[in-house]
Amino acid sequence: MSEADAATSVNVAEKLGFKDGDLIQEFGYDDDVDLDLRDDIEDLTGSELLDEDDHDVVDAVIFWWRDGDGDLVDTLVDSLTTLTEGGVVWVLTPKSGRAGYVSPSEIQDAAPTAGLHCTTSAGVSKDWSATRLVTRKNK
């Protein structure tokens, strides 16, 4: 990875709102995730991403979501169990035209049922987009 690419990646992790000391829980890890983005989040926060089985209270949740992964509402609700008040959920989905693509409207439809509100969407890597969700009281 070039120095310019590395700076861009870290900027993405920072743009997601992560900072040194944050605990981030990850759901939906598979062999298609963006390993560079994961590494950059870990470098920025100074700790490894926690997996789905961890029960520590976390500052944010990221989950990799693909078409066919199951019930999005249930997964969103599950992601809230360890999230601190005011924490953020980032749903990472394959970009349009990629295998597993999920329409943004699917996330927008599922979020309110799970007690969440969509605030922002952004491209975070070559293959993945991210949608930021917060609890309704923390708009």
Image (cartoon, rainbow, N blue to C red):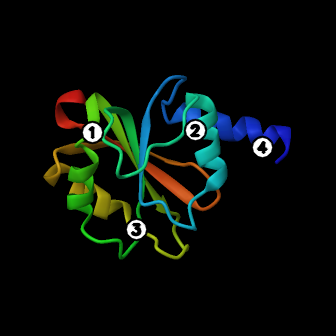
Residue 5: numbered disc? 4
From mark 4 to mark 1, how far is it between C-alphas?
32 Å
- Looking at the image, which residue is at 54% across and 39% down? 48
Q: Say how many tags the image has.
A: 4
Give the residue pinned by disc 1. 82
Q: Nearer the viewer, mark 4 or mark 2?
A: 2
Instruction: Pick whichever, 139 or 28, lies toward us.
Output: 28
Instruction: Quote the CA–CA distance across marks 4 and 2.
Output: 14 Å
Residue reaching furthest to the top: 20
Q: CA distance from mark 3 to mark 1?
A: 25 Å
Which residue has dot 3 on it? Answer: 102
The mark that comes first in sequence, 2 or 3, is 2
What's the residue at 46%, 71% (across, down)?
A: 101
Q: Earlier in the sequence, mark 1 or mark 2?
A: 2
Crowd tier of the residue under label 4, counting other residues whose Cα lies within 10 Å: few below 14, some 14–19, many 20 or above: few
Q: Are marks 3 and 1 in contact (CB under 8 Å)?
A: no
Please provide percent x and percent y for residue 2.
85, 44
Mark 2 vs mark 3, CA separation in Å? 23 Å
Task: Classify mark 1: residues with Cα within 10 Å, few (<14), some (14-19) or many (20+).
Answer: some
**Could you say whether the residue bearing mark 3 is in a helix, strand or loop?**
loop
The residue singled out by tag 2 in the image is 41
Image spot of residue 91 (x, y percent): 40, 52
Left or right position of 36 against 17: right
Q: Report, in whole angstroms, how far the alpha carbon at label 1 lies from the one at label 2.
A: 19 Å
- As shown in the figure, which amino acid type bears the numbered disc 4? Asp
Name the quadrant of the C terminus: top left
Q: CA distance from mark 3 to mark 4?
A: 26 Å
How many neighbours does mark 2 have within 10 angstroms: few (below 14), some (14-19), or many (20 or more)? many
Label located before the other in sequence (4 or 2): 4
Q: Amino acid at mark 3?
A: Val
Instruction: Name the one closer to the observer, 60 or 109.
Output: 60
The residue drawn where x is 57% and y is 67% is: 32
